[in-house]
């Protein structure tokens, strides 16, 4: 195996620098002028025609009318004059190291090595779909942390990434491994019970590189033997985890379907509720009071109806959750709960992330600008990255995508992104 690897490296070296530089990891030297047909301001919804974004290194230096920005010697010019340009999209709920596979046995055969390979493939797919930033909320063996580092070093193409490491959950809960009988002693990486254990797990995840903490407040759909409506961690356990995470500078994302778990997690001070399927008026009021973000993951229900073949222990749960989630989330949206876009990509194939926005607008009646903000400014705010990304502004990362028309007129155009630049590097350009 090592011999084969060494041979591959030798072959690459023999081909020379051209082959290596084919890996698009470094921004162009000097200025890159991105000539945009129109630029969409995702904060105001306003469109400005004929703009040029000046990119230097990883960041946007300025945005001005094209007539005011003549090309200089040494500039690289990117012609997007036929396209609408907007900031790269953000998905705050991905699982880049997981693949779409519900077969219980196949799930048991998932190794850290397989997760790492999945991650390399899925990170690229997600980036090319226009998602220049993701928050990864659950992976085995800290494979997400290694993936993040490989992306940051330029070794692998992928979005900017915050990684949670293993999901923290109770024995037998949504985030444990419940497929095997007791004699196999299978335990999920992040299983912890009681105050002392959950504190230890938070600190351990941070020790090994987690940017945020992901906890499982209630049961889930794709796990065996648990109830999405039942609370799992106690209020006190969640308070202990949030206190530790926040003291150590990490945000907390809570998987929560059931109403009681949503309320407890919110009262414990988590930064986001993931899924929120059974949210009720009490939960809505508490989330508004605490400023907690809701991260609906709704397109997966549509995808499941068409393509999902779930094992028996999940099928009825998916039916039950799907029957109520959209209605409840719609009420939370209307009540003014803050929303950040997440997809749970991996439950369905990576790269379809933008379908989530279509659900918000065309099924739940959200205003197109508000929907776009869930995947840009709001998502950046939830991640604590508002100074880095989420809008096209001088000083922020040059995370730029382009589509054929204004997405505020048709959200589905985001499902076919023609141009992707991340941190000043062009990864995709299908501009004609
Ligand atoms: Zn998830």
Image (tube, rainbow, N blue to C red):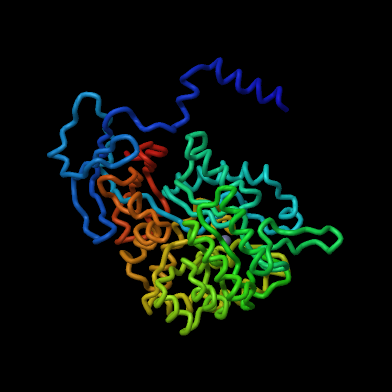
Residue 397 occupies which quadrant of the picture?
A: top left
The number of callouts visible is 0
Residue that sits furthest to the left in the current view? 68
Residue that sits furthest to the right in the current view? 183
Would residue 389 be found to the left or right of residue 258 on screen? left
Residue that appears at 64% across and 78% down: 230
Residue that appears at 44% across and 62% down: 341
Q: Position of residue 345 (x, y in %)?
A: 54, 56
Q: Position of residue 231 (x, y in %)?
A: 62, 76
Residue that appears at 34% across and 60% down: 410
Residue that appears at 30% across and 61% down: 408
Would residue 378 be found to the left or right of residue 42 on screen? right
Nearer-the-camera pick, 163 or 391: 163
Q: Position of residue 96 (x, y in %)?
A: 56, 50
Quarter the N terminus occupies: top right
Indicate whether 181 appears above or below 157: below
Quarter the C terminus occupies: top left
Ligand 1 - quadrant of the structure image: bottom right
Indicate whether 76 appears above or below 347: above
Nearer-the-camera pick, 133 or 209: 209
Residue 311 occupies which quadrant of the picture?
A: bottom right
Q: Position of residue 225 (x, y in %)?
A: 73, 71
Residue that sits furthest to the bottom in the current view? 281
Would residue 198 be found to the left or right of residue 328 on screen? right
Would residue 327 be found to the left or right of residue 117 on screen? left
């Amino acid at each position: 195996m090592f011999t084969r690897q060494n041979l591959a490296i030798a072959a690459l070296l023999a081909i020379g620098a051209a082959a290596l530089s084919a890996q698009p990891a470094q921004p162009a030297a000097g200025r890159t002028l991105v000539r945009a047909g129109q630029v969409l301001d995702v904060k105001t919804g306003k469109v400005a025609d004929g703009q040029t974004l000046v990119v230097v290194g990883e960041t946007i230096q300025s945005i001005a009318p094209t007539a005011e920005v003549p090309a200089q010697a040494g500039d690289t010019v990117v012609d997007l004059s036929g396209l609408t340009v907007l900031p790269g999209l953000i998905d705050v709920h991905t699982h880049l190291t997981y693949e779409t596979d519900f077969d219980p046995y196949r799930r048991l055969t998932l190794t850290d090595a397989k997760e790492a390979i999945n991650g390399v493939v899925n990170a690229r797919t997600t980036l090319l779909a226009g998602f220049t930033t993701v928050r990864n909320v659950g992976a085995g063996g800290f494979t997400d942390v290694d993936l993040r580092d490989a992306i940051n070093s330029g070794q692998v193409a992928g979005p900017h990434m915050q990684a949670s490491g293993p999901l923290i959950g109770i024995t037998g809960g949504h985030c444990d491994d419940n497929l095997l009988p007791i004699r196999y002693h299978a335990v999920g990486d992040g299983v912890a019970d009681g105050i002392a254990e959950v504190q230890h797990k938070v600190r351990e995840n941070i020790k090994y590189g987690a940017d945020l903490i992901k906890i499982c407040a209630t049961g889930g759909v794709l796990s065996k033997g648990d109830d999405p409506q039942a609370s799992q961690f106690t209020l006190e356990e969640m308070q202990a985890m949030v206190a530790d995470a926040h003291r150590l500078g990490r945000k907390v994302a809570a998987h929560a379907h059931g109403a009681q778990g949503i309320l407890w997690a919110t009262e414990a001070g988590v930064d986001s509720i993931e899924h929120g399927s059974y949210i009720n008026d009490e939960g809505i009021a508490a989330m508004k009071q605490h400023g907690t973000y809701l991260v609906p993951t709704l397109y997966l229900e549509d995808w499941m109806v068409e393509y999902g073949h779930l094992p028996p222990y999940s099928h009825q749960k998916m039916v039950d959750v799907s029957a109520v989630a959209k209605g409840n989330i719609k009420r939370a949206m209307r009540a003014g709960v803050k929303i950040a876009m997440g997809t749970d990509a991996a439950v369905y194939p990576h790269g379809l992330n933008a379908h989530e926005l279509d659900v918000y607008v065309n099924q739940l009646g959200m205003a197109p600008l508000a929907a776009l903000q869930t995947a840009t400014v709001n998502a950046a705010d939830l991640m604590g990255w508002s100074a880095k990304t989420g809008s096209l502004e001088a000083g922020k990362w040059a995370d730029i995508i382009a589509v054929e028309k204004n997405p505020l007129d048709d959200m589905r155009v985001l499902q076919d992104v023609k141009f992707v630049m991340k941190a000043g590097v062009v990864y995709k350009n299908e501009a004609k």
